[in-house]
Amino acid sequence: MVRDPGLGFPLPDNECNDKNCPYHGHLKVRGILLEGTIVSRKMQKAGVLLREYLHYNKKYQRYERRRSKISVYIPPCIPVKEGDWVVAGETRPLSKTISFVVVYNKSNPPKSGGGDA
Ligand SMILES: [Zn+2]
């Protein structure tokens, strides 16, 4: 059974039975959305998302590049490989370090999704 978490992203092509899937389980996505690159997919059902952003340095009146890594949950129905650009939504803590879940893969979008993103 598919449940649209209401984020405006197309639904995934595949189905899964994961209870921690925002589309086929009971996981609620609330809070912020982050975008970034998946740099590691070695964990089961999880990956590492690298986020690069600019931070303004007041003294030198320039932007400095900063980067941070967060661990994200990847439900089995969303195909994600290393190097993919994905959107992750904030959710409740799923483990010690994971409180974000991948909701959309921009590098490999669903073929038959119903949304308009
Ligand atoms: Zn799913």
Image (cartoon, rainbow, N blue to C red):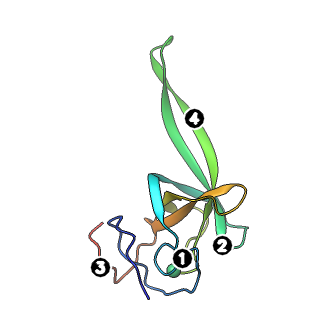
Please tell me which residue is depicted at 48% across the width and 33% down the height of the picture: 54
Q: Amino acid at mark 1?
A: Pro
Q: Position of residue 88 (x, y in %)?
A: 50, 59
Distance Cα–Cα, label 2 vs label 1: 10 Å
- SS label for mark 1: loop
Depth order, front residue of 81/90? 90
Please name which of the two marks, 4 or 3, marks the residue nearer to the observer. Answer: 3
Distance Cα–Cα, label 1 vs label 4: 28 Å
Q: Which residue is mark 2?
A: 45
N-terminal label among 3 and 2: 2
Q: Relative to residue 107, is residue 55 depicted above or below?
A: above
Q: Position of residue 78 (x, y in %)?
A: 52, 76
Decide: marks 3, 2 in contact (CB < 8 A)?
no
- SS label for mark 4: strand
Q: Residues within 10 Å of mark 4 (few under 14, many from 20)?
A: few
Please name which of the two marks, 2 or 1, marks the residue nearer to the observer. Answer: 2
Q: Residues within 10 Å of mark 3 (few under 14, many from 20)?
A: some
Q: Amino acid at mark 2?
A: Lys
- SS label for mark 2: loop
Q: Which residue is mark 3?
A: 114
Q: Which residue is mark 4?
A: 66
Please tell me which residue is depicted at 50% across the width and 12% down the height of the picture: 60
Which residue is at the far top? 59
Distance Cα–Cα, label 4 vs label 3: 35 Å
Marker count (numbered):
4
Q: Position of residue 70 (x, y in %)?
A: 63, 51
Please name which of the two marks, 3 or 1, marks the residue nearer to the observer. Answer: 3
Q: Amino acid at mark 4?
A: Arg
